[in-house]
Amino acid sequence: MLSSLSRNWWLLALRGIAAIIFGVLALVWPALTVFSLVVLFGALAFVQGVFSITTAIIVHKKNENWWAILLAGVAGIIIGLMTFFWPGVTALALLYLIAAWAVVTGSFEVAAAIKMRKLIKNEWLMIAGGLLSILVGVLLVLFPGAGALSVMWLIGSYAIALGVLQIVLSFRVKSLASKSTI
């Protein structure tokens, strides 16, 4: 499994790049309309889901715990598609949709990291990304009235931090390619 992950490190890097681009756009244009936010968020969730499913398919023969990555990907695609098919969703409903996606995805990432802790070093990066997702989801549920601008800043900052963690993890996994015999 480790050799499959290290050969396909670029999938993690692409997930990170997509998250950073989304985060920067959210911070640069905080006055985006709800429709624009729906499109950007839907694209991020969908792309992250596709990359997660691709990763799960690649590693499924080498690791019996590939299902956690697959479920995170399915959740991302479902949430992404929901945002595209119902763009007129209210700001509060979108907020709860984003919160649910963050909690579900974060939980599966933590589970996957715990399962892979004996196979990879620095699994804490994946755990940190998952915990960050869960924290953001919980904060969005606890403080929904914080206002659209603060939600945009929170989501943008979260996406950039998550993207950086995913890119760092991708290069750590890539560096294991020459060391792997698994």
Image (cartoon, grey):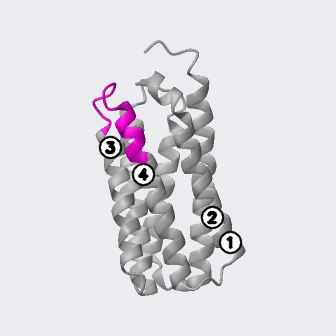
Q: Is residue 176 above or below residue 113?
A: above
Which quadrant of the figure has residue 179? top right
Residue bearing the label numbered 1: 27
Secondary structure beneath dot 4 equals helix
Secondary structure beneath dot 1 equals helix
| Front: mark 1 or 4 | 4
Residue 66: percent from left, percent from top: 32, 36
Residue 21: percent from left, percent from top: 64, 60
CA separation, marks 1 and 4?
25 Å
- Residue drawn at x 61%, y 43% as measured from the top left: 167
Q: What residue type is disc 3 on?
A: Ala
Residue 56 within the segment the image draws in magenta? yes
Q: What residue type is disc 2 on?
A: Gly
- Within-10-Å neighbours for mark 2: few <14, some 14–19, many 20+: many
Task: Determine whether label 1 and label 2 are within 8 Å by CB.
Answer: yes
Residue bearing the label numbered 4: 50
Range of residues picked out in magenta:
52-66
Mark 1 or mark 3: name the one nearer the start of the chain.
1
Q: Is residue 157 above or below residue 85?
A: above
Question: For this rendering, which residue is in front, 129 or 166?
Answer: 166
- Within-10-Å neighbours for mark 3: few <14, some 14–19, many 20+: many
Q: Residue furthest top?
A: 181
CA separation, marks 1 and 2?
6 Å
